[in-house]
Amino acid sequence: MRVLVTGGAGYVGSHSAKLLTECGHDVLIVDNLAEGHRPAIGRARFVEADLIDRKRIAGLLTEHRIDAVMHFAAFAYVGVSVREPAIYYQNNIVGSLSLLDAMRDAGVNRIVFSSSCATYGIPERVPITEDHPQHPISPYGFTKLVIEHALADYSHAYGLGYAALRYFNASGAAADGTIGEDHDPETHLIPLILQVALGQREYVEVFGTDYPTPDGTCIRDYIHVDDLATAHVAAIEKLQPGMALKLNLGTGHGASVQEVVDLCREITRHPIPTRAVARREGDPPKLVADASAAKRELNWQARYSMREIIESAWAWHKKHPRGYQD
Ligand code: UFG
């Protein structure tokens, strides 16, 4: 297939574009490099463009005879979205709608969309199934939910085929060490812990030790970025016009912040000092996926363990202590 990948210079986008190419698909990456990294693109064809430019995107879809789109381009900092909702609404919603309309202009009717467990908000029950009510508690989560609704309406009205993939906690790095996680600023737990092991930070803050969990710290479902990539390829290969898939992508297993720190200590052989601080606003105690629908629909399940996630991330951060600058 000829696949246009938006946000292909970003974290999940670059790993998925790499796998698409390895599976024999023809990839065209479109990224405005606002958050993405040029070196993450590898050998794929690349056009620097903004999704808001509907005419240009429609032109690229037509010119490259694109069959389907994988849409990753978005801002993804929950905290920033609370302080600066305007740029989230603009980029994540207006940008995505512009892309969908460019696809209509060009007659492209299949899309895999990067959604999030943040669309569920504070869960009423865990593990979370796809029919769990979606009540996001951040502008970021809301922008993802709005686009899920737009996809459903476009599917109904225009015959669009879509897969909304709701990721839990994307983590880890490519097995061959070529690409990995590089956010500026970094806010995610595993890279922050590994920066302590690299001597770039003195300690890692543990946000809340009084949660109703066995060790008092938050539980999350960490999923290897290459497992996410595999699910995206399976989804795009299955999609047909008019098809609607809404799937959680997680392992079904949770790890607490304390467990992640302990495993990082073991793998890096560094003491990794921690400091208990107050809870971070908006953090639910426990988020774990029920990923059985993805198994049923895509014959997909996560292959990488928590240990493999941290080992791959550690290999990447050791080799690239300043991310793509190295
Ligand atoms: N945490 C700490 N200290 C830190 C950073 C994180 O204790 O310095 C904790 C958080 O409180 C949380 C866990 O580590 O319990 C994981 O936090 P991350 O920031 O790594 O990830 P989040 O769970 O907040 O965010 C992820 C995705 C978002 C998505 C969100 C949905 O990165 O895109 O899940 O809840 F929206």
Image (cartoon, grey):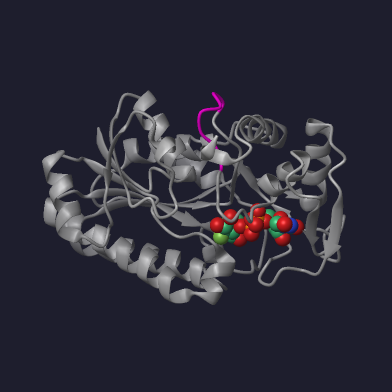
Taking depth in this image into account, of 247 and 95 the one nearest to the observer is: 95
- 72 to 178, vertically: above or below: below
Q: Is residue 100 above or below residue 303?
A: below
Most foreground residue, 59 or 71: 59
Identify the residue shown where x is 41% and y is 58%.
Answer: 74
Q: Position of residue 269 (x, y in %)?
A: 84, 32
- Is residue 262 depicted above or below 117 in this figure? above
Q: Position of residue 81 (x, y in %)?
A: 52, 70
Where does the C terminus fall, quadrant-wise?
Answer: top right
Q: Magenta part mainly helix, strand or loop?
A: loop
Residue 132 visible within the image:
no
Where does residue 22 sit, x and y in percent of width and height? 38, 24
Quarter assignment of residue 316? top right
Residue in the image at 36% along x and 25% along y? 23
Q: Quadrant of residue 173?
A: top right
Residue at horizontal 16 percent and vertical 54 percent from the top: 56
Judging depth in this view, the residue of 109 and 61 nearest the camera is 61
What residue lies at 74% left-to-right and 46% top-to-bottom? 193
Quadrant containing ligand 1 reads bottom right
Does any portion of residue 138 appear in the rendered image?
yes
Please state, as top left, top right, bottom left or bottom right, where the N terminus lies in the image: top left
Q: Quadrant of residue 44?
A: top left
Residue 280: percent from left, percent from top: 72, 68
* Residue range highlighted in magenta: 175-181
Q: Is residue 152 above or below residue 62?
A: below
| Horizontal side of residue 38 vs 295, given as left or right | left
User: Is 249 in the magenta?
Assistant: no
